[in-house]
Image (cartoon, grey):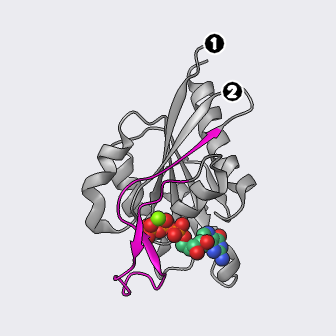
Amino acid sequence: MIIQKYKIVFAGSMGSGKTEAIKSLSEIPVLATETLNTDDASHKKMLTTVGIDYGEITLEDGAKIGLYGTPGQERFNFMWGVISQGAIGTIILIDHNVNAPLDELQYYLDFFKHHAENIAIGVTHIDENLDHSTHQYREWLVSNHLNYPLFFIDARKKEDVLMLIETLITKLEIEHM
Ligand SMILES: Nc1nc2c(ncn2[C@@H]2O[C@H](COP(=O)(O)OP(=O)(O)OP(=O)(O)O)[C@@H](O)[C@H]2O)c(=O)[nH]1
Ligand SMILES: [Mg+2]
């Protein structure tokens, strides 16, 4: 049997949960390239990714997926394209709790659409900001004539992150039928 290994990339805003999502899913210890966060202005969290995070998951059909996490900080955007090479899909995570989540969504979509056709969006941290409208994302996608799949997820929950992975794979299967 030939075991195929596919690559899926986690991109998106600082603190949106990329490293956490990979940790939730991975069946191997995650190689996380985190260091102390000195960029308090962007996010108050303790640690931030400064390289590539890596984990792995085997799906029910035996397909192995390599999970690659990008560093969210814009100063590392020179790495994003390199990490995306050869990926079958990209998950863009957006933190619902930031001041302008739609600006972030636009920024990351604009960047990653040049590196990936197969994109799914996960909006995280919903539980921390129940007052903030969740309708804005779909309205923004519709008004921009974009039809990327969009989910509201918690990166700490394996089943939520798995749903995004399965969405990307299903999209690929439909496109290659
Ligand atoms: N309450 C809540 N916390 C979340 C959610 N998703 C992720 N987190 C937490 O948010 C924090 C930041 O997550 P990280 O995975 O470090 O974020 P990141 O996207 O890797 O950030 P950078 O590496 O700095 O770009 C962690 O403490 C996560 O557990 C969510 O949906 N709700
Ligand atoms: Mg990270």
Placement of the C terminus among the 4 image quadrants:
top right
Q: Which residues are magenta?
A: 30-57
| Image x and y of residue 67, in percent | 52, 45
Question: Looking at the picture, does residue 174 appear above or below residue 120?
Answer: above
Look at the picture and state if 134 lies above or below 60. Answer: below
Of the two numbered discs 1 and 2 on the same chain, state the one appearing first in sequence. Answer: 1
Amino acid at the residue labelled 2: Gly
Ligand 1 quadrant in view: bottom right
Label 1 to label 2, Cα distance in Å? 10 Å
Which residue is pictured at 41% across the width and 40% down the height? 116
Rendered-image quadrant of the N terminus: top right
Say which residue label 1 marks. 1
What residue is pinned by disc 2? Answer: 62
Q: Nearer the viewer, residue 81 or 4?
A: 4
In magenta segment, residue 174 = no
Q: Secondary structure at mark 1?
A: loop
- x 58%, y 15%: residue: 2
Q: From the top left corner, tell me how far across and down residue 114 is, in percent.
A: 33, 43
Q: Which mark is residue 64?
A: none
Q: Are marks 1 and 2 in contact (CB under 8 Å)?
A: yes
**Is 95 displayed left or right of 81 in the figure?**
right
In this view, the residue in front, 88 or 28, is 28
